[in-house]
């Protein structure tokens, strides 16, 4: 495999690996490690299949688009609107969760308790807003820094905690909480926006796209598994919602930088959608900066500012809707695509129905828990 292949594969891995990982040990602690690993492997394989479906769609289309463009081509304006709603829902859920997580992390770091979470969240929001208003060049470098930091953190923490892992913390299970990890795990596995970018990167070597998707998909699954193994093995049921807050040493700082990078990249992406796609430049400050802060205060007022819960509903609703639309789009692309693809995945109405039912049920159950 050449450098182009690995660079393309890591594009998917880098998009998938993000701050969502910080909520996984907590939901695993509720269900038990074995049940949590079931969801990681099961959803990881389903996401791999959906990513391959989306890759096939890009290969069946002569003109290169971003995800909204493919949606509009094969599912019309209605499909594009549903996809934009799903994207907005996921981004706002993530921004809200990161405000919650950063407030708690800074408070724990400086005062060893969460009593000052709201002031620190407000301070974090203010700094991020200034950076967004000024505009920062080299976004790709900032995003890459966040990805490298997260990957390094996972390996380091596993080595750091390895000797303290207690097998008893990994052996219990709670079937009554079987579904709890679903939304958070799904959130942590989402990376659909990178597939069109991979299609561009692999240009003239399209036959490698399928393998790049497979390799890029399995790297996060492996890293998530050892991250959860380390934290759950050491802290068991005492692991916190933001996993890096479980340790009172320097480790919370690593979670802070991970969430900071993710918050910034998502905010820039959201800002660009409002300016370039929706042509609402004058309203972008409210929707990108003020609206997430308003959501944060509302969640605190109604006492539902729960890091893992927000990630869960964001993953289930945003991920579930997007997956269903991609599967439907694949059926349409097989019929109306204008290019012969380098690979094709099995897809029919039965498969579409089964998978759609799984993710629709996930949406209903996660919303019901919220």
Image (spheres, grey):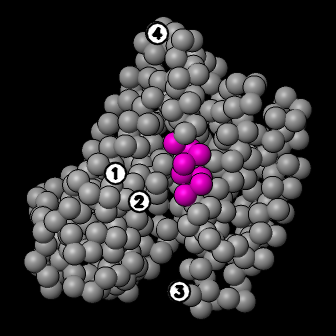
- Label 4 vs 2, first from the N-terminus: 2
Circle 3 residues within 10 Å: few <14, some 14–19, many ≥20: few
**Quarter occupied by residue 335:** bottom left
**SS of the residue under disc 3:** helix
Q: Choose top left, top right, bottom left or bottom right for residue 91.
A: bottom right
Mark 1 in CB contact with mark 3 (< 8 angstroms) = no
Per the rendering, the mark at residue 216 is 1
In the rendered image, which residue does mark 2 sit on?
11
Q: Position of residue 136 (x, y in %)?
A: 70, 73
Real-space Cα distance between discs 4 and 1? Answer: 30 Å
Q: Which region is colored magenta?
A: 144-151
Residue topped by disc 4: 167
Disc 4: CA contacts within 10 A as few (<14), some (14-19) or many (>=20): few
> Which comes before the other along the chain, label 4 or label 3?
4
Which of labels 2 and 3 is toward the front?
2
Residue topped by disc 3: 277
């Amino acid at each position: 495999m050449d450098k182009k292949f690995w660079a393309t594969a890591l594009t998917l891995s880098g998009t998938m690996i993000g701050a969502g990982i910080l909520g996984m040990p907590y939901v695993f602690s509720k269900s038990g490690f074995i049940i949590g690993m079931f969801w990681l492997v099961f959803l990881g394989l389903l996401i791999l299949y959906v990513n391959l479906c989306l890759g096939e769609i890009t290969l069946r289309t002569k003109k290169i688009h971003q995800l909204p463009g493919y949606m509009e081509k094969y599912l019309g304006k209605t499909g594009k609107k549903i996809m934009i709603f799903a994207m907005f829902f996921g981004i706002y859920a993530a921004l809200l969760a990161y405000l919650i997580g950063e407030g708690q992390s800074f408070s724990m770091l400086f005062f060893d308790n969460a009593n000052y979470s709201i002031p620190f969240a407000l301070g974090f929001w203010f700094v991020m807003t200034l950076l967004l208003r000024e505009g920062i060049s080299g976004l790709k470098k900032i995003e890459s820094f966040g990805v490298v930091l997260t990957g390094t953190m996972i390996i380091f923490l596993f080595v750091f905690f390895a000797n303290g892992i207690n097998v008893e913390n990994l052996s219990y299970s709670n079937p009554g909480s079987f579904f709890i990890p679903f939304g958070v795990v799904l959130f942590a596995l989402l990376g659909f926006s990178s597939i069109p970018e991979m299609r561009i990167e692999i240009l003239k070597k399209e036959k490698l796209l399928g393998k790049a998707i497979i390799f890029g998909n399995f790297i996060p699954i492996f890293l998530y598994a050892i991250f959860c193994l380390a934290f759950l093995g050491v802290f068991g049921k005492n692991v916190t919602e933001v996993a890096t807050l479980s340790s009172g040493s320097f480790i919370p700082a690593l979670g802070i930088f991970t969430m900071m990078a993710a918050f910034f990249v998502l905010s820039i992406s959201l800002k660009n959608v409002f300016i370039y796609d929706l042509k609402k430049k004058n309203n972008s400050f409210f929707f990108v900066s003020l609206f997430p802060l308003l959501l944060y205060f509302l969640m605190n007022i109604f006492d539902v500012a729960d890091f893992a819960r927000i990630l869960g509903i964001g993953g289930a609703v945003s991920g579930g809707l997007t997956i269903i639309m991609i599967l439907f789009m694949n059926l349409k692309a097989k019929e109306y695509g204008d290019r012969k693809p380098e690979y094709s995945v099995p897809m029919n109405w039965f498969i579409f129905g089964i998978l759609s039912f799984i993710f629709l049920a996930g949406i209903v159950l996660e919303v019901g828990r919220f």
